[in-house]
Amino acid sequence: MNQLILKAPQGPLKGSIDLPGSKSIANRYLLIRALAKEDFRIAHLPDSDDTQLLAALLSKDHELYDAHHAGTTSRFLAVYLAFKEGNQILTGSDRLKERPIKGLIDALIELGASVKYLEKEGFLPISFASPKPTYRSKIHIDGSVSSQFISALLMLAPTLPQGLEIVIEGTLVSESYVEMTLSILTSFGIEVKRLANGYAVKAQSYRLMDVSVEGDWSAASYYFGLCSVFPESEICLKGLHPESIQGDSALIKIYHKLGLKSSFGAQGLCLRQQGKPTQMFDYDFSNCPDVFQTVSLSTALLGIQGLYSGLSTLAHKETDRISAIKTEISKLGVSLYKMPAKFSSKSKKEYYMQEGHAASKDDLVFPTYQDHRMAMSLSQVSRLEEITILSPDVVSKSYPRFWDDLVKLGFSVQYS
């Protein structure tokens, strides 16, 4: 299945979708279970590649831990392996070997981990030996690289002999994911003290219980996008929580500005394309960077000018997502460009401007850049005409049945 031809139905989209469980929440449950060294049931565990891989690697001892393309998996495994007896190697795909991990590894070394870089310093692959017998109880870490570093250390902290104080330097990116971690820690009985520039966690035991993974708001984003660009559509999404701990629940506010009405009811969260979208959309994606691609394509198809910030982490994902989106929307006659530094002189933010109204073109073919979110976001372009998506199976990283679920909404999906 090297490519997929996607054709949209005539008229509005109507239907109901059972969303997969949140990959972010599930992966945190899995790491906590491994660190606590006691079993508990995790219901509604998503069948995504990343989550299933992490579950398999944490379920038994290995000499080689291959995280493949999964950034979260690699960071969570690093914390797990750092204080595990014996010798293990953590590695990943070529792209994962380009993604930064030095800040987290430096912190683990300070805490007593025995670590050696096997190729390039600061990047995978890494070998872990049995930890040193002495541990520090306070570390400093740059918060501007990845919130996953902070989350991983917070989950590790209660299991350390003296607990851990984390001092965050710089601006913490994707703070909503750290808040998610804190909420989950609280649910397991862990006390975390908030400091002016970090967190303090004393040594304590997890209060374990069976859990269920709530629906994935990141997966929901693709239906927000589709509903916004297909007039008079109505899609109901099952599994989402009104009071969600996921930062991507900001989708309700984002897409309200793009003409979507949303309400929770017996069928879940129901989306209706009824409102009049704004003509200029200004948004900071710092707490929900994973929905940027979807929103960028929605605004392109609606002909809305966009002013975006909070995108600093996107260059180090499965691909450089800013560059990828810029390239693909240009095929539709839409431009995305970085604003001059003087535009950001007061706010100190990086801004990107998007301009243009997506227009139909012949033979639209889109690569997916080994990025599941590129593939699913691009489904919106079928609003214009039949499109071809290359390497469509990349969606298995987070949402394996995505294309099948589109068929439920009336799309034609043909593999070749």
Image (cartoon, rainbow, N blue to C red):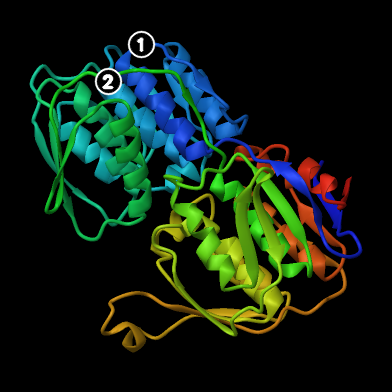
Q: Earlier in the sequence, mark 2 or mark 1?
A: 1
Name the quadrant of the N terminus: top right
Disc number for residue 235: none
Mark 2: which amino acid? Tyr
| Mark count | 2
* Residue beneath disc 1: 38
Left or right, 33 with reference to 22 = left
Question: Which residue is painted at 70% across and 62% down in the image?
Answer: 272
Judging depth in this view, the residue of 266 and 189 nearest the camera is 266
Q: Are marks 2 and 1 in contact (CB under 8 Å)?
A: yes
Residue 47, image x and y in percent?
A: 62, 29
Name the quadrant of the C terminus: top right
Judging depth in this view, the residue of 325 and 248 nearest the camera is 248
Mark 1: which amino acid? Glu
Residue 330, image x and y in percent?
A: 67, 76
- What secondary structure is found at the residue carrying circle 2? loop
* Residue beneath disc 2: 206
